[in-house]
Image (spheres, rainbow, N blue to C red):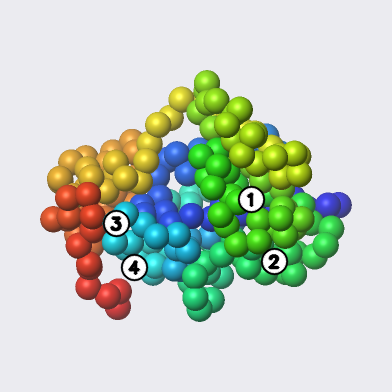
Amino acid sequence: MREAVGIMGGTFDPIHFGHLLAAEEARRCFGLARVIFVPNGVPPHKKQYQVTPAQWRYEMVVLATASNPAFETSRVELDRPGPSYAVDTVQAFRMELGPEAGIYFITGADAMLEILTWREPRRLAEMCEFVAAMRPGYDLRRVEEALGPELRERVRWLELPGVDISSTELRRRAGAGESLRYLTAQAVARYIEAKGLYREQGIGLRRPSKPA
């Protein structure tokens, strides 16, 4: 039987319920056997803030996904040197899973607008299909126009319930000492508090001490 697997890459700084909801809805709607979360080791695109060390982001993803037996977390991008390119990650999973497996790369509709700036987007599209998660009422026209017909036919659209949560807002709240309850898993909120992540940062991040 052909196995279908979701790959959800991202910085996850920090992971939140929006990420988890997108993964679960993709799993349910497209009949995925499992969803593998892949935290970036070195995000390839420049961020407007200082990214939290990869090991801590990985540990937060492990905590957030532990209660769902269909979710896994991979270190493939942490253990691979250099920038974390989606095309390299999907190729690694394609080699592991074999040519018959269905691979669905789960991302946001806004990220699809930028896909032509990714490394080898057409080769990436040959190895997987994309699941683009969007809020109700999202205007697809600009995304479809940006993609063009060749890439557009490789995209599956996934409308999510009206959940508007961002990692940016979680970093702001944590930096201000505000509650993260109902925005991310309690285990993640406790981890952020214990490590003192995102404190005294404003919009950018202070540089935490290196993980042990």
SS for dot 1: strand
Tell me the crowding category of disc 4: few under 14, some 14 to 19, or many 20 or more residues within 10 angstroms, Cα based: some
Mark 3 vs mark 4: in front = 3
Mark 1 vs mark 3: in front = 3
Tell me the crowding category of disc 2: few under 14, some 14 to 19, or many 20 or more residues within 10 angstroms, Cα based: some
Residue 149 placement: quadrant: top right
Return the mark for residue 91: 2
- Whichever of labels 2 and 3 marks the residue nearer the N terminus, that label is 3
User: Residue 91 location in percent, x, y?
Assistant: 69, 66
The residue labelled by disc 3 is 49
- Whichever of labels 1 and 3 marks the residue nearer the N terminus, that label is 3
Amino acid type at image mark 1: Phe
Amino acid type at image mark 4: Pro
Please determine whether, in this image, residue 152 is positioned above or below residue 193.
above
Q: Could you tell me which residue is drawn at 42 percent across and 54 percent down?
A: 12
Amino acid type at image mark 2: Gln
Residue 158 placement: quadrant: top right
> What is the CA distance from the residue labelled 2 to the residue labelled 4?
25 Å
The residue labelled by disc 4 is 53
